[in-house]
Image: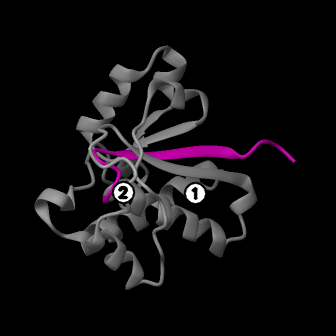
Amino acid sequence: MSRPIRVCFVCLGNICRSPTAEAVFLHLLAERGLEDRFEVDSAGTGGWHVGERAHPDTRAAAASRGIEIRSRARQFVAKDFDAFDYVVAMDGSNHRDLLRLARTDEDRAKVHLFRDFDPAGAPGQGVPDPYYEGGFDAVYDICEAAAEGLLAHLTGRA
């Protein structure tokens, strides 16, 4: 068996968008029996919430759809590029921060904007931050659409 594809979703504090994306993606993998083909994680570009569970409204939005978010916040660091094949940013600001953190062209090539994978077509758009803007359910829906597209891309069905 080949090595799993390693994916890390990244937002600002790792308590809203990226844990949602991680949980949604893991749920899709489980539904399709693909868990053994991937390793999935999430992180934040900032370290304010390290060790915390996802925001209560984030967990509630997922729970209302039967998904439990279990991750704890952590900060993305440069050496994380060695551990992942795809580093998926939730918005343009985090995308730029990740590119600045990248040490090499190889690192930079791993950085992608999540909604670029949305099959409905949202290239260049970010996932809104519900911590500041509200809309936790809308963020879940956006993550679900983009996760479907990312999975299709990674499994060669895009």
Residue corresponding to mark 2: 52
- Give residue 127's position: percent from left, percent from top: 27, 54
Q: What residue is at 36 percent from the left and 73 percent from the top?
A: 59
Helix, strand or loop at label 1? It is helix
Given residues 81 and 89, the one toward you in this image is: 81
Residue 13 seen by the camera: yes
Residue 119 seen by the camera: no
Q: How many marks?
A: 2
Instruction: Point out the stretch of residues depicted in magenta.
Output: 1-16
Task: Point out the residue furthest to the top here.
Answer: 104
Give the alpha-carbon distance from disc 1 to disc 2, as whole Å: 31 Å
Residue corresponding to mark 1: 152
Nearest-to-viewer mark from 1 and 2: 2
- Above or below, 40 relative to 78: below
Q: What residue is at 38 percent from the left and 22 percent from the top?
A: 101
- Give residue 145's position: percent from left, percent from top: 41, 65
- Above or below, 150 relative to 54: above
Kind of residue at badge 1: Ala
Q: What residue is at 29 percent from the left and 38 percent from the top?
A: 46
Task: Let me know if residue 4 is in the magenta part.
Answer: yes
Task: Point out the residue furthest to the right here.
Answer: 1
- Above or below, 11 relative to 19: above
Helix, strand or loop at label 2? It is loop
Classify residue 48 as left or right of residue 26: left
Q: What residue is at 71 percent from the left and 63 percent from the top?
A: 34
- Give residue 143's position: percent from left, percent from top: 38, 62
What is the crowding at mark 2: few (fewer than 14 residues within 10 Å), some, or many (at least 20)? some
Kind of residue at badge 2: Glu
What is the crowding at mark 1: few (fewer than 14 residues within 10 Å), some, or many (at least 20)? some
Classify residue 103 as left or right of residue 37: left
Pointer 1 or 2: first along the chain: 2
Classify residue 37 as left or right of residue 111: right
